[in-house]
Image (cartoon, grey):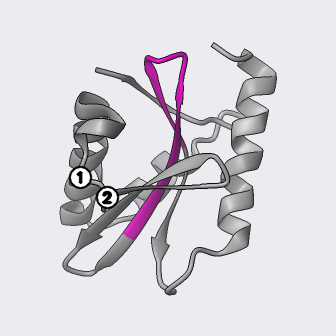
């Protein structure tokens, strides 16, 4: 089981938590339950269609009745599920800006906390 850690900016804001809080109650439950399932099962225990990797960063694919969500994350030190970026997917392909945002946050987290 992994500890779930939300990336926080230097000012203490958590973009992933803010995104989740912006959703409707039913969507919040679905997104949080999928993140929890990932923390319990890990990458290998999740269905292959739910986890993808791009530029060395993993993302969780979540669907609900109203649409689709993506949550970028990494596994740090074999025990931390670090949630970096989340958004509602509205287009067929991932936007380069979303990938770059996740990569930049990962780099910032590693700068602050080092590689575990």
Of residues 24 and 62, which is closer to you in this image?
62
Q: Quadrant of the N terminus?
A: top left
Q: Is residue 81 above or below residue 65?
A: above
Residue 10 in view in this figure = no
Q: Is residue 101 above or below residue 95?
A: above
Indicate the position of residue 107 as horizontal and vertical percent values: 77, 36
Q: Quadrant of the C terminus?
A: top right
> Are dots 2 and 1 in contact, CB under 8 Å?
yes
Disc assigned to residue 50: 2
Residue positioned 59% across, 36% down in the render: 7
Local SS, label 2: loop
Region rendered in magenta: 69-83
Of residues 112 and 116, which is closer to you in this image?
116
Q: Is residue 95 above or below residue 101?
A: below
57 on left or right of 67: right
Q: In the rendered structure, does residue 75 fall within the stretch colored magenta?
A: yes
Magenta part, dominant SS = strand
Q: In the rendered structure, does residue 48 fall within the stretch colored magenta?
A: no
Question: How far apart are the alpha carbons under marks 2 and 1?
Answer: 6 Å
Say which residue label 1 marks: 47
Q: In the image as oriented, which residue stretches furthest toward the right?
A: 111
Residue 97 in view in this figure = yes
Residue positioned 20% across, 53% down in the render: 29
63 on left or right of 3: left
71 on left or right of 30: right
Q: Residues within 10 Å of mark 1 (few under 14, many from 20)?
A: few
Indicate the position of residue 104 as horizontal and vertical percent values: 77, 47
Local SS, label 1: loop
Q: Is residue 8 above or below residue 101?
A: above
Disc assigned to residue 112: none
Indicate the position of residue 90 as horizontal and vertical percent values: 47, 84
Residue 76 lies in what quarter of the image? top right
């Amino acid at each position: 089981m992994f500890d779930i850690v939300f990336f926080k900016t230097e000012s203490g804001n958590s973009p992933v938590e803010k995104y989740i809080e912006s959703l409707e109650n039913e969507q919040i439950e679905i997104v949080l339950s999928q993140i929890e399932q990932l923390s319990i099962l890990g990458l290998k225990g999740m269905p292959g269609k739910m986890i993808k990797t791009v530029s060395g960063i993993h993302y969780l694919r979540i669907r609900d009745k109203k649409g689709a969500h993506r949550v970028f994350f990494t596994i740090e030190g074999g025990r931390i599920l670090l949630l970096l970026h989340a958004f509602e997917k509205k287009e067929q392909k991932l936007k380069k800006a979303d990938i770059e945002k996740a990569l930049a946050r990962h780099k910032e987290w590693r700068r602050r906390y080092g590689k575990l």
